[in-house]
Image (cartoon, rainbow, N blue to C red):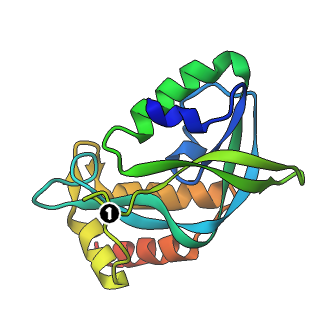
């Protein structure tokens, strides 16, 4: 967990842009909407296990360069620091597909904070890059991994983002194409 040295001592904030938003899995005392700039939510990470295989990889979300991304910020108090960092290490850093960064963000209540954010590691072999829309739909439609069909992951993500007030037009377009492809 050498990456944790980037996190300031004491309590800290964590940014969720995908499933971390509705299943943080770590103790926190506060949560609220936030936005980070310089990165956007994208299906840019090959999934060789959970939503695909080596033979038929799936795609899952990453934060890639450019644009901005709304999501949820979670405040971890000092007393839960080590537990939260261990849980985040297990969840986000297992295959080193992400780089942990401390990014500035504005919370919904106007406060400016620095958030621990996991962005895609472009030099990782699982980085898919920017794929054409039709290729994304094709990959997601056919991939299946340990946690089920890749299409279920995308459809579930789109539903959760919309329910939380963070609709994503690009992901919604993928979901509509998947629904037509049934």
Tell me if residue 87 comes above or below residue 124 in the rendering. above
Residue in the picture at 47% in, 67% down: 42
Q: Determine if residue 24 is in view.
A: no
Residue in the picture at 63% in, 23% down: 81
Q: Quadrant of residue 83?
A: top right
Q: Secondary structure at mark 1?
A: loop
Query: Is 18 on the left or on the right of 8, as rendered?
Result: left
- Quadrant location, the N terminus: top left
Q: Nearer the viewer, residue 138 or 47?
A: 47
Query: Residue 181 location in percent, x, y?
Result: 29, 77
Residue in the picture at 28% in, 79% down: 135
Query: Is 103 on the left or on the right of 155, as rendered?
Result: right
Query: Residue 177 location in percent, x, y?
Result: 38, 78
Work out which residue is located at the far left of the displayed protein and give it: 55
Query: Is 167 on the left or on the right of 143, as rendered?
Result: right
Q: Determine if residue 154 is in view.
A: yes
Query: Is 8 on the left or on the right of 178, as rendered?
Result: right
Residue in the picture at 35% in, 78% down: 180
- Quadrant location, the C terminus: bottom left
Per the image, the residue denoted by label 1 is 127
Query: Residue 153 location in percent, x, y?
Result: 39, 55
């Amino acid at each position: 967990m050498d990456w944790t040295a980037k996190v300031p001592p004491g309590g800290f904030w964590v940014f969720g842009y995908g499933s971390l938003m509705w299943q943080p899995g770590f103790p926190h005392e506060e949560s609220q909407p936030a936005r980070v700039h310089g990165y956007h939510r994208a299906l840019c990470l090959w999934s060789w296990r959970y939503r695909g295989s080596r033979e038929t990889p799936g795609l899952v979300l990453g934060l890639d360069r450019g644009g901005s991304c709304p999501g949820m910020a979670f405040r971890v108090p000092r007393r839960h620091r080590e537990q939260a960092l261990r849980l985040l290490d297990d969840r986000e850093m297992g295959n080193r597909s992400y780089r942990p960064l401390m990014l500035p963000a504005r919370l919904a209540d106007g406060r400016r904070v620095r958030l621990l954010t996991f962005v895609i590691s472009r030099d990782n072999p699982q980085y898919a890059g920017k794929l054409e829309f039709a290729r994304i739909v094709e990959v997601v439609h056919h991939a299946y991994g340990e946690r089920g069909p890749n299409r279920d992951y995308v459809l579930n993500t789109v539903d959760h983002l919309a329910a939380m007030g963070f609709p994503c037009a690009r992901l919604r377009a993928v979901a509509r194409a998947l629904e037509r492809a049934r």
